[in-house]
Image: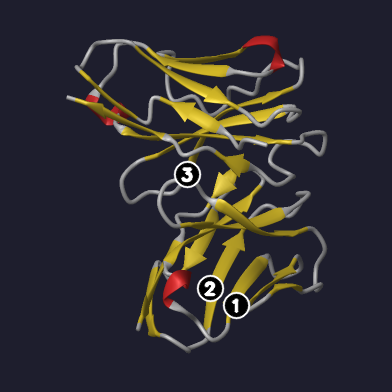
Amino acid sequence: GAGVSQSPSNKVTEKGKDVELRCDPISGHTALYWYRQSLGQGLEFLIYFQGNSAPDKSGLPSDRFSAERTGGSVSTLTIQRTQQEDSAVYLCASSLGGSGRGADTQYFGPGTRLTVL
Amino acid sequence: EDKVVQSPLSLVVHEGDTVTLNCSYEVTNFRSLLWYKQEKKAPTFLFMLTSSGIEKKSGRLSSILDKKELFSILNITATQTGDSAIYLCVRELTFGTGTRLTIIP
């Protein structure tokens, strides 16, 4: 079976534009996470989806960031009016879920490298 | 405060050496602490630790959790160049900044 996939792998955009990043989790995984990793930094939690429950958005840095998960599968992270400080690698991960947020093994996608000029 | 601190930040050793990577945290109530290896972009799973004092082993790698002293260690014996990577410790959704390990042939 396929692992977690993300698209695009690289995205270059101009400051002020909106971007959408896509994540396809492993089939059957009920939990989905978004993180970002700035150069030389650790992973920063953004948002967590578990099944049909309301997402945990506690890590979103501003209201320019939002995410959806349609049909319990594919997720889209949207960044509106991008700023240069949004430049980072955005990683998506999925897990079987059911053990609680972050409590089980997460399988990471290859990430999307976002560069805001 | 919900912090995960890893040390050292960077470590350079020769092939064949043994290394110990440290991870300390501050929150006492949690389900699991995990270790990941990040070579390029996607971290890959190494260990999940849920109980204190029980060592997990996988080949040359081993890890243990001490819930009383609030830390975990990751040991790598007989290091190889393929072990060069960033090693990440995570307590639920809080990641440490990682330890960058470089193995010199």
- The residue lying at 67 percent from left, 45 percent from top is B92
Which disc number belongs to residue B75? 1
- What percent of the width, then of the height, locates residue B2? 59, 47
Q: Is residue A12 left or right of residue B73?
A: left
Residue B1 appears anywhere in the view: no
Q: Do pointers 1 and 2 mark residues of a single chain? A: yes
Q: Quick one: B58 or A61, which is closer to the camera? A: B58
Q: Residue at x 49, y 46 (%)?
A: B42
Q: Which residue is mark 2?
A: B21
Q: Residue at x 44, y 49 (%)?
A: A42
The answer to whether one can see residue A69 in this image is yes
Q: Quadrant of the N terminus of chain A?
A: top right
Amino acid found under the numbered disc labelled 2 = Leu
Q: At numbered mark 2, what does the secondary structure look like: helix, strand or loop?
A: strand
Q: Please give the residue where the numbered disc 3 appears in the rendered image.
A: A43
Q: Which mark is residue A49?
A: none
